[in-house]
Image (cartoon, rainbow, N blue to C red):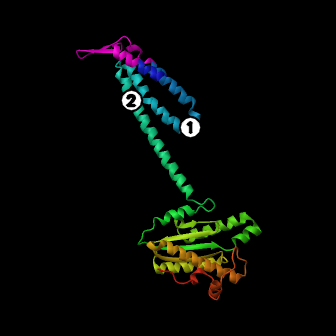
Amino acid sequence: MLCAADVVFLSVGTLTGKLFTVENGVYTIGPWNGFCTVLPSVCFLSNLAIVIRKAGVLGKEQARVMMIYFIMPGLAAILLIINCDWAFSYVGLALGMALFFVLVQSKAITETNLRAKMYNELSTTDLLTGLKNRRGYEALLFEIGADEAVCAVFCDLNSQKEVNDNLGHEAGDRLIQGFADLLRETFPDDSVFRISGDEFVVIIRNVEAEPLQAQMQAFGEILRKKDRIASYGYESGAGNHVLNIFKIAEQKMYRDKDVYYLETGKLRRHARPTASAQSDASGSAEGASLPPSGC
């Protein structure tokens, strides 16, 4: 209201010549000129009082930003007292408003970008393990180039349901977290994904055949030392066949799991082992014993 009244005052005063007149290039102060700072001063002090009063609600950072709004008009008011040239106050006000707008917009953009980044990270992160989740896994599939050499490693915890039923879901969660830590120690953290309750996928990009074979054999040894905590299967190839690569790796993982249940005699969660799995039982139960990868 005060700002609107000030605009009306200035408009009427300028049009009627009550604020100033210019004749033959000579600027003459009008009778209303002495009042032109009254409403801006009231607005200035009112806003300053509101910011100070609401500093606790706004927060220290926001309050500091708001206070910048008053620096240039305040300086202009001081200059106006020293020099009666009315232009100082409005130039100062314009500069103050421009500075305030730039700072607020910059802060808003920064906060928006940070918030978007935070939401994106939360939406692609598994809360239990801190690994990337299925959404992150699916997003990465679109980043793989057609000519890129990629390897998919599918892992599934063994006897997760047994742990949940006998020891409780907290113990089951600890088992999942422990296996997630094991995968972090074996593979780069950003290549590991938890895609469902007890299923994990590792996506290794730009792989080479010999190092990959050695890495997978070492991973199989780790699982054996961990009392076969999980079954796994892997496959590699060019990125333009990525879906087929992932499908084969998953199939190998399930074959390894069939062998695990046959050899241990434990009851499987869903279905009994297939005949094809029985024929594989004579070999090693580890993913490393599966048919060679495509790389």
Question: Residues under labels 2 and 1: Cα distance?
Answer: 26 Å
Is residue 16 at least partly visible in the picture?
yes
Which callout, 2 or 1, points at the residue further toward the start of the chain? 1
Give the camera-side residue of 127 and 142: 142
**Residue 282, disc:** none
Q: Is residue 208 left or right of residue 220?
A: left
Residue 1, above or below 69: above
**Residue 59, disc:** 1
Query: Which residue is pictured at 63% across the width and 69% down the height?
Result: 179
Magenta segment: 9-38
In the rendered structure, does residue 8 fall within the stretch colored magenta? no
Q: Position of residue 108 (x, y in %)?
A: 48, 42
Give the camera-side residue of 36 and 145: 145
**Residue 94, disc:** 2
Mark 1 residue crowding within 10 angstroms, few (<14) / some (14–19) / many (20+): few
Kindly indicate the quadrant of the structure image that contains residue 263.
bottom right
Q: Is residue 159 left or right of residue 199?
A: right
Farthest residue toward the left? 24
Query: Which residue is pictured at 53% across the width and 65% down the height?
Result: 137
Query: Which residue is pictured at 38% across the width and 29% down the height?
Result: 94
In the rendered structure, does residue 11 fall within the stretch colored magenta? yes
Kindly indicate the quadrant of the structure image that contains residue 56.
top right
Instruction: Identify the element where label 2 is drawn.
Output: helix
Q: Are marks 2 and 1 in contact (CB under 8 Å)?
A: no
